[in-house]
Image (spheres, coloured by chain):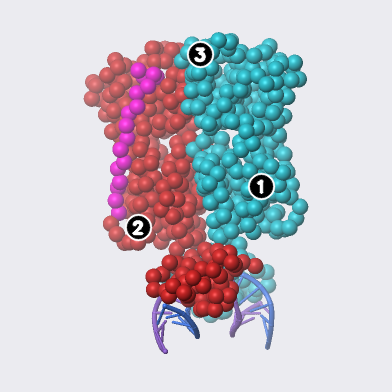
Chain colours: A cyan, B red, C purple, D blue
DNA sequence: CTGTTAGCGCTTTCAT
DNA sequence: ATGAAAGCGCTAACAG
């Protein structure tokens, strides 16, 4: 059986209260007492039972990070930053995957946000509307990551997707491209990511005097395979675009692969820009231009926002906008 | 305040015992009572307090997964499988990162394995020797993932790294390559991964009548950048290898990138084989040949082993060997 | 400065 | 089939 406070108290000849005080670093303790307790603590190799402590305090120090899929590089990199920062402020992170499935997302929220030991939830939703979320959130603090899916009364952290996409297009235009296609997602209301990126795409096109309702290759998800398929189809048509703005780096990777297979030179014949700037993109052939969101910034901002809300559940909610950067590499150089 | 069992009991006019029974799906309850309790449960929207339950039962249903870095694709994919499978058996997963730093790994083990709410730990160590682990593990069940770093009395799940590497080399030999170089890690005792893969490399070379102590390009880690640097240096030497066996796919990606930059054709001039078969490798140019460990199998085996050990802490420990597969693609076709 | 004690919410033994 | 009550290990309110 594990060593408890009482065991230590007995050994040291003091009350549990005193031991607890020593363990928690209270100030006003007689040096002699403290020393005696310390000795007992070490001799018995006492470890606090965190579950009991949590029950008592009503807080666990655990936050949950809900992502579509942890094996998707962007989310892996984001998770890395979240775990990193959370650990540095004494918080541990539990990870759950929604698979991007709205049903599963709802399930997770109803069970997690209400019931479990999780102090709060960082939620990177794909398919769920903000309104759905607001209703489901229950009492547990919830911070939204990524796109704000609707005007809600929830804290939210993300980058300006519209502006980022606009800049990507502007960059392609500046490089002399005129037949620019967008690639990825549905563009519909359910998929806020592509909705905003498509919107930014259109703004960029319009600003350049190009057709804002131009080519949009939709994909069922943001994975490499979907882009390969979409590009393969694209290349069978008559008129080819001279640039591709992909709504994720994985899509861009799939596109690059397919272009390579079909013998289309990048960027000479078709320039490619991605979104997310995952690590692999720096090493692809050709190296991929991409929008780089400040992932560490997102993580820190989100964790801080969550912690703040723990202390003040009723406080006003915020939209935190984190910077991004357009990184130009070979694929659009 | 949250709804407790007592609230429900009062509302339904029964004892907490009865409510608890209903919540936990006990059998022998009068239908009328059950109905009454159910109604109260729903009306009050009762959610069990998992912390209290855990304190009582001495189990949390949480396991911890310790990885070097979650943003490294292989670990991301592995984590995905672990979370996936654990969720399916009602276990939640907490993720922590060691950064591959032996000091941090020790810290994590001493704090986690002994103190926290974690029922057990899945540990994918990089720098820590098995002996270190055995001493540190404390009372908490621990399953080792990846290479067995030493003969220990711990459960361990992994693939046969030596045999896998041997097969990779055999494949290159079979394709007519004779000047095969190994790339990655230190090959030293502290880095079991590269130790075993190097050993398998040597076996493969010897079997083919080639110099088993041939070229070994060491790297400080398994990331893309390290391979780029190593290959850049390699290409400045006089005699070039005609094949590269990289100890991770990320290394291979970095190598491919550098070879591309230097205008070396793959596989014509140099064939490349990786290890891990991460998703990105299927889409690289050229597509990368690789050793594919059965990640889902590793995850399932490990979680099962951990759960088994929870029920029987004293039982005999096992080495679980999971299958792998050599996937041949363009880079060594 | 330190001891005593109530309870956090739940499961479970002991009764009935 | 159900109630009463102990207690998991801890913190903090209340004494002194």
Circle 1 — which element? Answer: helix
Eye-nearest disc, 1 or 2: 1
Q: Secondary structure at mark 2?
A: helix
Whole-angstrom CA distance, mark 3 to mark 2, is 57 Å
| Residue to which mark 3 is pinned | A236
Tell whether B53 sits left or right of B244.
right
Whether residue B332 is in magenta: the answer is yes
Label 1, on which residue? A131
Q: Which residue is located at x 47 percent, y 75 percent?
A: B33
- Crowd tier of the residue under label 3, counting other residues whose Cα lies within 10 Å: few below 14, some 14–19, many 20 or above: few
Q: Nearer the viewer, residue B208 or A300?
A: A300
The residue to which callout 2 is attached is B309
Whether label 3 touches label 2, CB < 8 Å: no
Labels 3, 2: front one: 3
Please give the range of residues in magenta.
Answer: B317-333
Callout 3 secondary element: loop
């Amino acid at each position: 059986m594990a060593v408890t406070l009482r065991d230590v108290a007995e050994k040291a000849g003091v009350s549990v209260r005193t031991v607890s005080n020593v363990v928690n670093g209270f100030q006003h303790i007689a040096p002699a007492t403290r020393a005696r307790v310390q000795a007992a603590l070490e001799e018995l190799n006492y470890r606090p039972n965190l579950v009991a402590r949590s029950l008592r305090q009503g807080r666990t120090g655990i936050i949950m990070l809900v992502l579509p899929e942890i094996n998707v590089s962007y989310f892996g990199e984001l998770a890395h930053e979240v775990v990193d920062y959370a650990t540095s402020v004494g918080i541990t992170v539990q990870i759950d995957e929604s698979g991007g499935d709205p049903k599963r997302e709802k399930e997770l929220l109803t069970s997690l946000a209400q019931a479990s030991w999780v102090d709060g939830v960082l939620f990177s939703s794909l398919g769920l509307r903000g309104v759905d979320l607001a209703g489901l959130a229950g009492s547990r603090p919830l911070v939204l990551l990524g796109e704000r899916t609707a005007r809600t009364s929830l804290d939210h952290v993300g980058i300006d997707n519209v502006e980022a996409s606009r800049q990507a297009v502007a960059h392609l235009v500046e490089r002399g491209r005129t037949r620019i296609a967008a690639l990825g997602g549905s563009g519909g209301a359910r998929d806020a990511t592509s909705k905003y990126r498509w919107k930014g795409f259109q703004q960029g096109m319009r600003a350049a005097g190009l057709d804002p309702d131009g080519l949009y290759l939709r994909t069922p998800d943001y994975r490499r395979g979907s882009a390969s398929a979409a590009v393969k189809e694209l290349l069978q048509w008559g008129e080819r675009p001279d640039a591709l703005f992909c709504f994720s780096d994985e899509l861009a990777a799939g596109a690059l692969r397919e272009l390579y297979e079909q013998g289309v030179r990048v960027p000479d014949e078709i320039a490619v820009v991605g979104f997310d700037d995952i690590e692999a993109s720096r090493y692809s052939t050709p190296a991929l231009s991409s929008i780089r969101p400040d992932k560490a910034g997102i993580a820190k901002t989100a964790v801080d926002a969550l912690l703040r809300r723990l202390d003040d559940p009723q406080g006003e909610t915020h939209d935190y906008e984190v910077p991004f950067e357009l990184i130009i590499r070979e694929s659009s150089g």
